[in-house]
Image (tube, rainbow, N blue to C red):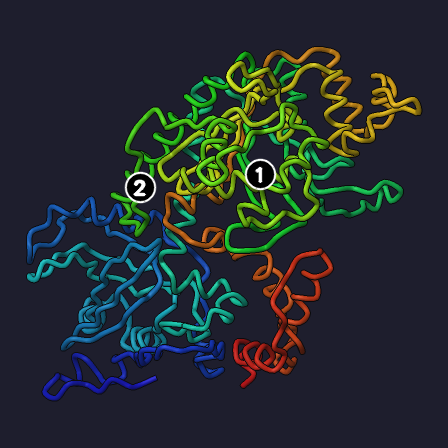
Amino acid sequence: MANIQRPVGEDPEAFPSVLYPRIKEPAPAMTRVTVGFKRPSALASAAKPDNKLIHPRMKLPAFHRKYSYLEPGASCLDPDPVTLYGKIKRVRTHGKLIFLDIIHGDVEAQIMLNAGSLVRSGTCSQAQIANRVNIMLTGDYYAFTGCPHRARQGTLSLNVTELPQLLSPSLHTVPEKVTDAGTMARFPQLDLVLNRKRRDLLRLRHVIESTIDHYLSRQDFTRVTTPILAADTGGAVARPFETQANGFSATPLRLRIAPELALKKLVAADLGPVFEIGPNFRNEGLDATHNPEFSTCEFYLPFADLNTLMTMTEELFSSIQKACDQATHQRLFSLGNFAFRSIPFKRLAFLPTLLDQIRLSVSEFRFPRNLDEESAKELLPLFTQLEIPVPANPTAARLLDSLSSHFLEPMCVEPTFITDYPAIMSPLSKSYLDSETGHIVAARAELFIDGTEYCNMYEEENDPFLQARKFFHQTHGEAADRNAYGYPLDAEEIKKRLTPGQQYFVRVLEMGLPPTGGWGGGIDRLVMLFGGAKKISDVLPFGNLRSVMAMGTSVIKGGDEKAPVGFAGLVNEAIAKMGMKSPAPNANKDEKLTEEMLGRR
């Protein structure tokens, strides 16, 4: 810290040199974080926060709105003082005056402090103001009470009339810039402090979730919370996270993959339209657009068909865009340029469009009449002809999905619904015979924008016998649906081979589920879309799972504690145990980064 000297010619009695604050030098741009104490013990002990908050206080946006009428050089004539709270961002002096810029919630305000005037008015002694001003540093939280005033240059300020109250001192030096991505991943708190775009994305997430909540609540939906821990995972097919409860150690528990089955049980219980916004967990990939823990919105509407769901999707996305535009205008978000150009959105039928695209390269190609696991083998030569990699475990659904990723999804630059998926790709939706293609297709649609899927919707299967067989095929494959004589298993035999959770859901359907439309969309992807973010970690408060695990590994227990050895190695080892891929750790580099981050070097 540098001592600011008293300007030549200043009256030493009116403004003694001890009143000039020891202003911290600007932190240089750094590629490594050094979290070290910036204050000696004597100064830190002097900077103990005051105990009592001052009320009422005024928020910074309200301060700017209320006193926007003040002309240059004018002060507020209201006898009641104004109190502002905020973090000191900058400290500077001009003659006998001290100017501080405070910030809270990305809104700034200027504080003007005339130490000589405070002493002469009898508000506080010279020693009190000297002690207080000399411990003021950037990063400290203070309460300032005074009179609003607009300077001749036009800046609105608060002219302090009482001794500033320290609320919370900052004992660490925070750099102005960090360029090392590994350091930011290990210390996401620092990323949030330095990166306003990250903070804006978190605020935008709130805007999007609130808009969805408001849109559905206006249409008489009930927001519910369904179990995250259960014996079954919830309907979707994915690798679950498993755990145990001390009180039920004999029963393995799983984190839910999706709330689908639980929400449909509520519809069957005659609760009416329901929705849930919350977390789900899939013990699978970790990349720029996927995280094992993610948030979704799912809603279920009785007596809704696919056209109703697509219309609601168009209305919902339009509402979200308007809300984001309004938030961008009000808070000056620095967000993406995404905009809807037309409603209704474009629609592509899966099989006819895919066939047209394939025939541009293989003119004589046609799909098998029955798209099942047996006939899907006929698709394998097509992958060779088109030089498309064959997916691992090439089931019929995976082969068709791979063809869709190659041909259909790149066509969806503007918001586009892909409809009429082959029934084999959608085991939980209703299906029907498509008169145009002659194939059994699902009453399902997915919305793609710029080649990325954002939501999935379909008419729910409510036939208990068909649903039981679809559950069985989903778990065991169609080939297992045969008895010793080669005939399909009967309904009771199928039900016996389902999991307890599946059996319970089939029993619910036996009691009656009205025709229901179901919709699911990823909240994280919506924030990425409307916020212009390229990575899912940018829209999560503390980054993806790798950053969260790194944060948990770097706990400091004492001043002499050494940094963890093989820091990234520990994280990547844990990730590998989950079956996820992770780059090979560089032990020397990671230990060095970690020690520097924790202030050990």
Q: What element carries label 1?
A: helix
Residue 322 image-quadrant placement: top left
Answer left or right for 101 relative to 597: left
List x then y, in percent, for residue 535.
46, 54
Please tell me the numbered disc located at residue 401.
1
Question: Could you tell me the amino acid type at mark 2?
Answer: Ala
The residue depicted at 43 percent of the width and 28 percent of the height is 348
Answer left or right for 268 relative to 75: right
List x then y, in percent, for residue 253.
78, 42
Answer left or right for 90 relative to 538: left
Residue 173 image-quadrant placement: bottom left
| Residue, disc 2 | 327
Q: Which label lies toward us, 1 or 2?
A: 1
Q: What element carries label 2?
A: helix
Examine the rendered structure and indicate whether residue 139 appears above or below residue 493: below
Instruction: State the CA–CA distance, disc 1 to disc 2.
Output: 37 Å
Examine the rendered structure and indicate whether residue 430 appears above or below residue 583: above
Q: Nearer the viewer, residue 233 or 552?
A: 233
List x then y, in percent, for residue 515.
60, 13
List x then y, in percent, for residue 368.
62, 27
Q: Can residue 263 be seen in this view?
A: no
Q: Nearer the viewer, residue 209 or 238?
A: 238
Residue 165 image-quadrant placement: bottom left
Q: In which quarter of the image is the C terminus?
A: bottom right
Question: Could you tell me the amino acid type at mark 1?
Answer: Asp
The residue depicted at 54 percent of the width and 40 percent of the height is 403
Q: Nearer the viewer, residue 150 or 330?
A: 330
